[in-house]
């Protein structure tokens, strides 16, 4: 991940304040919510900004496990469950849903920080790549430009992710055909048209490309200098 922004959903204001204080002391930026539906709305609108969620289960308005599933459906983000439900059944269900960790209250806030640090090390850019204004979700094959999802056609998406799998490597038009669902007899100008459409959608240009560079006589190269 490229940030340390945390979404905290906790209706106990004293605990919320304590956790928030510890997170800030260790370099995390935290947005805290006591009402889960407000938190869900925030996550729907700004999920790209968040690196991890800390989620209480005993919430008003909606059960914590139901909220867990809604958050995961929006983005496959690591979620740490922080709850007074310490029975083994809830723990098993939480891990079955995909929780990264399960902390039973009461616990030391420092333990939460250590567990979060370990989780984010495991998640380090495994599923998302940030390239300038582009955020690329490798898990769901989605691409965002300035937080707005790009609407690629099926073949444009295949070509784009062929570039991403071969960043900084020259790939020929034949390579593009072999790594996508394009037919073997696809003409060069058809491939070039698809790439022109991709360039337009990612705010790139052929004369001074930020991303897709034409390599004369061979094909293309997706540039990423970082």
Image: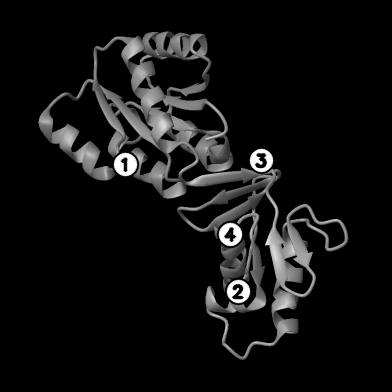
Tally of numbered tags: 4
Q: Earlier in the sequence, mark 3 or mark 2?
A: 2
Q: Earlier in the sequence, mark 1 or mark 3?
A: 1
- Report the side of 209 relative to 225 (left or right): right
Q: Which mark is residue 176?
A: 2
Q: Which labelled disc corresponds to residue 121?
A: none
Q: Along the line of sight, which residue is nearer the eye, 75 or 33?
A: 75
Residue ID at (39%, 45%):
72
Q: Give the alpha-carbon distance from disc 4 to disc 2, as whole Å.
A: 11 Å
Quadrant containing the C terminus is: top right
Q: Say which label, 1 or 2, has the lower sequence index.
A: 1
Residue 219 percent coordinates (x, y): 71, 71
Numbered disc in front, either 1 or 2: 2
Residues at marks 1 and 4, CA–CA distance in whole angstroms: 39 Å
> Measured from the top left, where is residue 54 in percent x and y?
38, 27
Please determine whether, in this image, residue 75 is positioned above or below residue 6. Answer: below
Cα separation between marks 3 and 4: 14 Å
Q: Secondary structure at mark 2?
A: helix
Q: Which residue is mark 4?
A: 166
* Relative horizontal placement of residue 161, taking residue 107 as reference (left or right): right
Q: What residue did someone put label 3 on?
A: 226
The residue furthest front is 217
**Of callouts 4 and 2, the N-terminal one:** 4
Q: Which residue is mark 1?
A: 66
Judge the density around disc 4: few (<14), some (14-19), many (≥20) Cα neighbours within 10 Å: some
Question: CB atoms at circles 1 and 4 under 8 Å apart?
Answer: no
Q: Give the mark nearer the N terminus: 3 vs 4.
A: 4
């Amino acid at each position: 991940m490229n940030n340390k922004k945390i979404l905290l959903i906790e209706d106990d204001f004293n605990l919320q304040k304590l956790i928030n204080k510890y997170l800030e002391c260790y370099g995390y930026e935290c947005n805290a919510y006591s009402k889960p539906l407000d938190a869900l709305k925030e996550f729907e609108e700004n999920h790209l900004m968040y690196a991890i969620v800390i989620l209480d289960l005993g919430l008003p308005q909606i059960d914590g496990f139901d909220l867990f599933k809604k958050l995961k459906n929006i983005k496959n983000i690591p979620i740490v469950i922080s709850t007074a439900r310490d029975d083994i059944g809830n723990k098993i269900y939480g891990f079955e849903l995909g929780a990264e960790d399960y902390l039973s209250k009461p616990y030391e806030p420092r333990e939460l920080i250590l567990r979060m640090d370990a989780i984010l090390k495991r998640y380090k850019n495994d599923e998302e790549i940030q390239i300038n204004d582009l955020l690329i979700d490798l898990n769901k094959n989605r691409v965002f430009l300035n937080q707005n999802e790009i609407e690629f056609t099926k073949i444009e998406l295949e070509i784009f992710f062929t570039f991403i799998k071969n960043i900084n490597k020259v790939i020929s038009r034949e390579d593009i055909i072999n790594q996508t669902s394009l037919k073997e007899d696809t003409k060069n100008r058809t491939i070039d048209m698809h790439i022109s459409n991709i360039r337009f959608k990612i705010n790139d240009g052929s004369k001074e490309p930020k991303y897709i560079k034409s390599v004369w006589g061979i094909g293309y190269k997706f540039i990423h200098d970082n």
